[in-house]
Image (cartoon, helix red, strand yellow):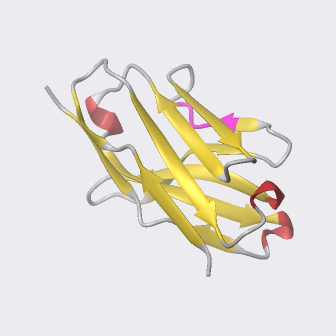
Amino acid sequence: QVQLVESGGGLVQPGRSLRLSCAASGIIFSNFRMGWYRQAPGKQRDLVATITRAGTTNYADSVKGRFTISRDNAKNTVFLQMNNLKPEDTAVYHCNAVSRLETYNYWGQGTQVTVSA
């Protein structure tokens, strides 16, 4: 059974930082492209960042320079370091795992991030 379990969300003030984690089980983690997506109330789910099996990263323009995605294949975990958070970063953040050739696509339940003074 595949599980992606996010953690690390919470309520923070603008300008502060959070680090999200996503622990994967039931997959060969190193074979998957991992990503973070977010969904604000009433909006579609949008890409935040992805990291390939080789470690190549890609970011949404809105988070470039503030967020960093990384992975630890030994711990089957992907991270999202979020710095200088803004109120518009408020959303539920979901972890995503996509296999080679996109044969399999898995999602986590999400973790809430709220940025407010």
Figure quadrant of the N terminus: bottom right
Q: Measured from the top left, where is residue 13 in percent x and y?
A: 21, 25
Considering depth in this image, is 24 or 47 the residue closer to the camera? 24
Q: Is residue 16 visible?
A: yes
Q: Is residue 113 above or below residue 87?
A: below
Left/right of residue 57 with respect to residue 12 in the rendered view: right
Q: Is residue 11 above or below residue 17?
A: below
Is 91 within the magenta?
Answer: no
Name the residue at 78% across, 47% down. Answer: 52
Name the residue at 57% across, 37% down. Answer: 60
Q: Measured from the top left, where is residue 48 in percent x and y?
A: 53, 43
Secondary structure mostly taken by the magenta-highlighted segment of the chain: loop
Q: From this viewpoint, which residue is outermost toward the front?
A: 74
Q: Is residue 62 visible?
A: no
**Res 84 quadrant in image:** top left
Q: From this viewpoint, which residue is outermost toward the left?
A: 117
Q: From this viewpoint, which residue is outermost toward the bottom?
A: 1
Name the residue at 50% across, 31% down. Answer: 81
Left/right of residue 5 with respect to residue 24 in the rendered view: left
Q: Measured from the top left, where is residue 86 in percent x and y?
A: 31, 27
Q: Measured from the top left, where is residue 21 in percent x and y?
A: 50, 45
Left/right of residue 54 with respect to residue 76 in the rendered view: right
Figure quadrant of the C terminus: top left
**Magenta residues (range):** 58-62
Count all numbered tags in the image, as a single digit.
0
Q: Is residue 83 above or below residue 106?
A: above
Name the residue at 74% across, 54% down. Answer: 33
Left/right of residue 6 with respect to residue 117 in the rendered view: right
